[in-house]
Image (tube, helix red, strand yellow):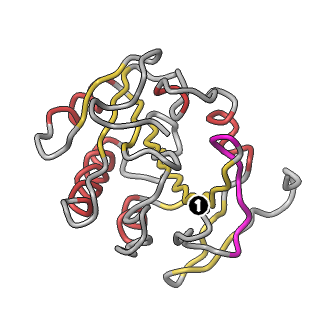
Amino acid sequence: MRDPGSAPVTRRRDGREWRIGTDSDVAWIREATPIGRAITSAVPPVFEAYATVVVPDKGHGREEDVALLLRLLAARSPGPWWLGYLDTGADDVVFPDAPRVGLDSSWPYVLVHAGPAQAAAWRRDLWSWRAPGPDLVFPADRSWLLSWLWDDDWRCLGGPAELVDRVLAESALEARRVTPDEDATPPGHVAR
């Protein structure tokens, strides 16, 4: 862990420096998300409302799906955001030499302080299982969190009721409301 008095770790991309997150930036998530099937295994139980959003298969609207989700989140919180990229060993983590933070059973993520434009643009590899977009997104004020766990084919969202209601109202998204203690697995899907 980095000394709190030391300079932030940064990496250069797109002509500027980006702050790389530390374990302390995600401690609020790691400490409140136990292993299990409830939505709170991906999103801390601190939000007013929760939903799952199914991730479409490649070639079946995945790019449009993530673009719509990011627009809805940006309308609520224009930035800055924390973007997390899960290091699967095969997928783009945007900054391959950056330090990792441990989340979700200590899975390593590269965490970057950026915003909606970077969330939409940085990971575009359409051959990747994880792309496009980040695996973890939350604003600096922690008012919501969107998470896509390692082996799930859905994202988990926690946040204000009005944000969750907007996501649920989008007919282009396959979304459903869940309670904090409910199994997050969407009907017809399998938790691994």
Q: In front here: 157 or 5?
A: 157
* For residue 145, side relative to residue 28 (left or right): left
Q: Residue 77, image x and y in percent?
A: 37, 45
Which residue is at 38% across, 59% downward?
A: 116
Magenta residues span 97-105
Vertical placement of residue 178 versus 123, above or below = above
Residue carrying label 1? 112
* For residue 41, side relative to residue 164 (left or right): right
Q: In front here: 138 or 66?
A: 66
Q: Amino acid at mark 1?
A: Val
Q: In front here: 149 or 85?
A: 149
Q: Residue 16, image x and y in percent?
A: 56, 79
Whether residue 101 is in magenta: the answer is: yes
Whether residue 3 is in magenta: the answer is: no
Disc 1 on helix, strand or loop? strand
What secondary structure predominates along the stretch shown in magenta? loop
Which residue is at 30% across, 40% downward?
A: 53
Furthest toward the bottom, the residue is 15
Which image quadrant is residue 118 in?
A: bottom left
